[in-house]
Image: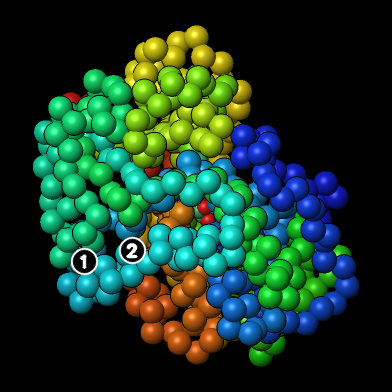
């Protein structure tokens, strides 16, 4: 297959793209350039790594196939969720207490990096503090209580359980049996965050090329990264293409499965209405395996996400999947217009733990945040930068965690995963 540099790189048609603050289009790479580090992919992972390296004085070139934030980073629910897609108890049971303690020590850092950069670089991305995890059943409440106890062992002091009677302080619906708040959670306009971080990279002399799909990498002491119009010779290459990487680099992209999730934004609501629905302006995510996530935007829309497509396949009509869920939560919104609906792909690993590693001494990768990546990508991008700078201790902890192939190989991994998700969906519905 021939990969061409896109002459017209574009964002997906989302509320985020419509309300992006930085509309500049960076030029594609033309000709041969040199850098200390070449980063492939301008999502949170790639830009976080580039910023860490630029701050340390490295010369960095970022190559993005489309636009900065084109992938999941510019399309997601914008929810700052601490921790990983697997809870720390499971990590301890699978990989041992020592590793769980080390991962636990890092588990609040992604959020700290975001808040720190927003302040340091004055990034205007509508940062709001506070998140609410909603439980439908007593079983989910007990699981949240157990998570809270484990989190607190790892130093998280921002959590509080919420009784059914108090749910209305955070979300006006009678769907939930209770929940938990995380004061260190929150929400952001993710595209404006990544665009602001990219501008910070450029302010430190980093170069970012859009419309510059990488078509191959010549490995070696100084790898050469190729697009169809140019090349970058660098001492290190960081591959951060996540769910959008395939079919290139099958040795990396084969370790994860692209999974789509759908998001929509209503028309702007009356301020009094949206304040009634989400009085604390916390973001909300429910505790089901296939979950709903929603929040208020800075212009008073309800941004509601959910649904899932294994293999990255989307339903034809995106709103037909999400709108019924929104109406279950907020039946009073029946007549509200949906202005935008879009989808994006995240990278799922079988273990639901991010996968970092080395293809060679000079080529590193990170992907597979498995749906909870806003904070984790910021952390892992920083860790990629540290590894290049000669401090690979934290990188090596992540790289030591096994990445298992999906059962069924490329042909059957999607139907088998759908079957697994169906089973977990039944458990959520019937509470067993
Ligand atoms: C719809 C949706 C909702 C989500 N909601 C949340 C949420 O609310 N909270 C949360 O914590 N997580 C959420 N996530 C997950 C989170 O968005 C991702 O984990 C995270 O953004 C991944 O960042 P990334 O940089 O690794 O990948 P991406 O943002 O996907 O970036 C990868 C980039 O690499 C580029 N690329 C790929 N191949 C090449 C190539 N060959 N050459 C050049 N460039 C290339 C792509 O164009 C892309 O821009 C959501 C994900 C989706 C899809």
Screen quadrant of the C terminus: top left
Mark 1 crowd level (few <14, some 14–19, many ≥20, 10 Å Cα): few
- Label annotation for residue 60: none
Residue 427 falls left or right of residue 18:
left
Q: Is residue 353 above or below residue 286?
A: below
Q: Position of residue 108 (x, y in %)?
A: 33, 63
- Residue visible at 37% across and 73% down? 398
Kind of element beneath mark 2: loop
For residue 340, side relative to residue 77 (left or right) = right
Q: Secondary structure at mark 1?
A: loop
Q: Residues within 10 Å of mark 2 (few under 14, many from 20)?
A: many
Q: Position of residue 340 (x, y in %)?
A: 60, 27
Q: Residue at x 22, y 72 (%)?
A: 101
Q: Where is the N terminus found, in terms of image quarters?
A: bottom right
161 or 258, nearer to the observer? 161
Q: Is residue 430 left or right of residue 47?
A: left
- Scheme of image coloration: rainbow
Real-space Cα distance between discs 1 and 2? 9 Å
- The x and y percentages for residue 355 are 43, 65
First-in-chain label (1 vs 2): 2
Q: Nearer the viewer, residue 289 or 384?
A: 384
Please, is residue 36 above or below residue 65 in the view? Answer: below
Image marks 1 and 2: residues in contact by CB distance under 8 Å: yes
Which residue has dot 1 on it? 155
Residue 278 occupies quadrant = top left
Point 54% across, 83% down: residue: 388
Q: Which residue is mark 2?
A: 108
Say which residue appears at 22% left-offset and 42% top-offset.
180
């Amino acid at each position: 297959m021939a990969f061409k540099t896109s002459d017209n790189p574009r964002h997906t048609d989302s509320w985020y793209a419509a309300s992006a603050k930085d509309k500049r289009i960076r030029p594609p790479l033309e000709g041969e350039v040199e850098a200390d580090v070449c980063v492939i992919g301008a999502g949170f992972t790639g830009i976080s790594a580039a910023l860490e390296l630029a701050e340390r004085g490295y010369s960095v070139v970022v190559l993005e196939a489309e636009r900065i934030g084109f992938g999941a980073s510019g399309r997601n629910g914008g929810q700052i969720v601490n921790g990983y897609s697997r809870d720390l108890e499971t990590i301890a049971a699978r990989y041992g207490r020592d590793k769980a303690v080390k991962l636990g020590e890092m588990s609040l850092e992604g959020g700290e990096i975001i808040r720190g950069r927003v302040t340091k670089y004055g990034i205007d991305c509508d940062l709001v503090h506070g998140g609410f995890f909603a439980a439908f059943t007593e079983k989910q409440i007990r699981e949240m209580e157990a998570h809270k106890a484990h989190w607190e062992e790892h130093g998280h002091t921002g959590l509080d359980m919420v009784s059914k009677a108090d749910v209305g302080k955070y979300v006006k619906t009678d769907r939930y049996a209770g929940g938990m708040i995380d004061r260190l959670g929150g929400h952001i306009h993710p595209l404006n965050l990544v665009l602001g971080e990219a501008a910070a990279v450029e302010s430190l002399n980093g170069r970012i090329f859009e419309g510059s799909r990488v078509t191959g990498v010549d490995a070696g002491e100084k790898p050469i990264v190729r697009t169809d119009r140019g090349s970058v010779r660098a001492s290190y290459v960081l591959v951060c293409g996540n769910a959008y990487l395939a079919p290139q680099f099958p040795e990396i992209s084969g370790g994860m499965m692209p999974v789509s999730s759908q998001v929509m934004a209503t028309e702007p609501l009356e301020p009094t209405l949206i304040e009634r629905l989400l009085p604390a302006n916390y973001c909300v995510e429910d505790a089901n395996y296939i979950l709903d996530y929603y929040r208020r935007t800075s212009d008073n829309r309800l941004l509601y996400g959910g649904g899932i497509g294994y293999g990255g396949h989307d339903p034809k009509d995106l709103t037909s999947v999400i709108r019924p869920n929104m109406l279950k939560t907020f039946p009073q919104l029946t007549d509200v217009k949906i202005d935008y609906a879009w989808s994006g792909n995240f990278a799922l690993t079988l273990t639901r733990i991010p996968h970092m590693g080395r293809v060679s001494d000079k080529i590193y990768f990170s992907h597979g945040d498995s749906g909870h990546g806003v904070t984790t990508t910021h952390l892992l991008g920083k860790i990629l930068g540290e590894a290049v700078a000669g401090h690979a201790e934290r990188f090596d902890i992540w790289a030591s965690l096994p990445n298992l192939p999906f059962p069924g190989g490329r042909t059957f991994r999607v139907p088998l995963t759908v079957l697994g998700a169906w089973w977990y969906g039944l458990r959520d519905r019937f509470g067993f």
